[in-house]
Amino acid sequence: MYRAGEGFVLRTANIADARLISDYFVRNREFLKPWEPQREPAFYTEDGWQRKLIKLQELHRLGLGFYLLIVDPKTDEMMGTVSFSNVTRFPVHSCNVGYSLSECCLGRGIMTKALSIAVQFMFEAQNMHRVNAAYMPHNDKSAAVLQRVGFKKEGFASEYILIDGQWEDHILTAIIKPSWKKRD
């Protein structure tokens, strides 16, 4: 996948992106810490990402997961990520989405635009009927992004995801493609 947005490019990660991705997570380590699972040391290294990207390439090839990068087309610096996991075809045709944005990119509408493009990719190219997302109740910025993209609240999950070493409650949301049709 490769799509140009306003001020960014959204594209599928490849093995050559290991340094780009590790640099992004090193640069944003403290900023993202309250919103993410605890990470093993290899997560912050180029070698660790090379190994991870080999596995992700296979998921991309099989259509079982997609790891997308938001990149500044002028500087080639990574601005954020959008990832789709738990991609399930028949009979539910759904997946989960997660995302992160560099601290220096906040407040510019980048995540709203990138997530909108990514969800449309999953609806059109991958024929998903539903994309699920969850956010912690105190994460107002994530709630606002999801609402702007069209996600609707569907429920509340106590102690849903292990974030920074603590089980955190999450609000469950989803966006549905109403015009979904089965493809052969």
Image (tube, grey):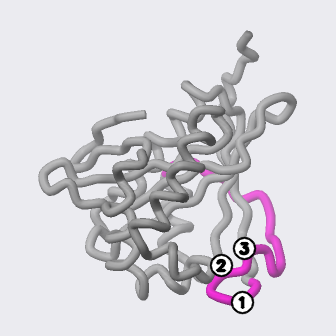
At numbered mark 3, what does the secondary structure look like: helix, strand or loop?
strand
Marks 2/1: CA–CA distance: 14 Å
In front: label 2 or label 1: 1
User: Which residue is the site of mark 2?
Assistant: 137
The residue that appears at 31% across and 61% down in the rendered structure is 20
Alpha-carbon distance for marks 2 and 3?
6 Å
The mark nearer the N terminus, 2 or 3, is: 2
Q: The disc labelled 3 sits on which kind of residue? A: His
Q: Give the x, y percent position of residue 105.
A: 28, 68
**Badge 2 vs badge 3, beta-carbon distance below 8 Å:** yes
Q: Is 75 placed above or below 119 here?
A: below
- Viewer-nearest residue: 41 or 24: 41
Residue interval drawn in magenta = 149-167
Q: How far is disc 1 from disc 3 in space, using C-alphas? A: 12 Å
Q: Comparing marks 1 and 3, which lies closer to the viewer?
A: 1
Question: Is residue 133 one of those drawn in magenta?
Answer: no
- Across and down, in percent, residue 12 comes to 43, 42
Residue at (65% x, 26% y) in the render: 127
Mark sitting on residue 170: 3
Badge 2 amino acid: Pro
Q: Which residue is mark 1?
A: 166
Q: Mark 2 packing: few (<14 Cα in 10 Å), some, or many (20+)? A: some
Residue 21 in percent (x, y) is at: 38, 63
Q: Is 158 contained in the magenta span?
A: yes
Residue type at tag 1: Gln
